[in-house]
Amino acid sequence: MDNIKEAELNNEEWMSCLPEKLWDVPLTNLSIPGSHDAMSYCLDITSPLIRSESDTFRLLDGVFCCFTRPAINRWATTQVQDIVEQLTAGIRYFDLRIAHKQYDSSNELYFTHVIYTHATVIKTLQTVASWLESHPKEIIILACSHFEGLDHKMHEEFIYSLKKIFGSKLCPRNEVLLTLRSLWTSGYQVVLSYEDQSAARHVDLWPAIPYLWANKPNAEELLQYLEWQKQLGRPEGFFVAGLNLTTDRCFITSHPRESLQTLTMENWNCVRKWLEDQKPGAEPTSLNIIAGDFIGPVPLCSIVIALNKKLL
């Protein structure tokens, strides 16, 4: 375990440190660590619920916020490291859920998971672009989704901002050769997936990346689901195997002393053993992006990166 924790500190430039034989392997066939709900480390506990929450929960939250808010904090927080710490740890896929606050007269966008974050979207992505400037051989995949409260005009303004922030780093979706060597040569560093029809006419934006989500509260059921998905065969392009556990409100109510972090840590050893047996590549049962919760406390990055050695 100590060796893995030590390796976590050396993943800042893991892509450029891969053996040369892997520089010509398509990114869709490499093993890439990802962060599920990457921005939930900075949830604003005083912010309103997102629009898609039910009226019943909204009413409950209004009357019993002294109970609901601590519960939201315990169960909606999926990360504890900030975006730069996650990048430095080796994360290269980011699940980013974006929204505009209801009744907000500004065009400011926030990240969400049940509630909104303190961090704003544009400022965060500028920080990511700055990190990429000093790490020119690292390639990242940003999966932007949900977009609650954005109308057509706001989508267009946001897409304009994305192009301004990342500029020539954005890899067009019609790029034929998606290997480290080819991306380094062309200067592309960002694959930006945009899960909305607004993206269709923008060649710099990629369609939604499939995410295999088990929606299960324990390792046994999670791994059973992922094994079943593997038997169906992998998609052709990028896809994500989610290692994140999910609970419902009955579970949360009946486990008042637990949190998503304690649940994740309790199940980690079982998930880890399965993960170490996985393999990237083009075979039907191979994996590509592997995303999880609590990057840092869980040594996901080093294990996922090490799977690439199986391609040699």
Image (cartoon, rainbow, N blue to C red):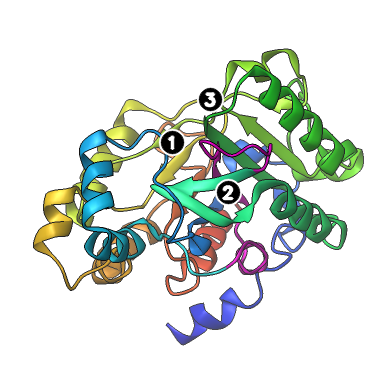
Query: Within the image, what quadrant is residue 154 found in?
Result: top right
User: How far apart are the alpha carbons under marks 2 and 3?
Assistant: 20 Å
Q: Which residues are drawn in magenta? A: 82-108
The earlier-in-sequence mark between 2 and 1 is: 2
- The residue drawn where x is 38% and y is 28% is 233
Q: Amino acid at mark 1?
A: Tyr
Task: Say if 300 sits above or below 139 in the image.
Answer: below
Task: Report the side of 299 relative to 221 (left or right).
Answer: right
- The residue drawn where x is 38% and y is 47% is 114
Q: Amino acid at mark 3?
A: Glu
In this view, the residue farthest toward the bottom is 2
The answer to whether mark 2 and mark 1 are in CB contact below 8 A is no
User: How far apart are the alpha carbons under marks 1 and 3?
Assistant: 13 Å
Q: Residues within 10 Å of mark 3 (few under 14, many from 20)?
A: few
Q: Which residue is mark 2?
A: 94
Q: Label 1: state its secondary structure.
A: strand
Q: Label 2: state its secondary structure.
A: strand
Rendered-image quadrant of the N terminus: bottom left
Q: Amino acid at mark 2?
A: Phe
x then y, percent, for residue 104: 59, 39
Q: Which residue is mark 3?
A: 236
- The residue drawn where x is 53% and y is 25% is 236
Q: Label 3: state its secondary structure.
A: loop
x then y, percent, for residue 206: 66, 26
Q: Which residue is mark 1?
A: 211
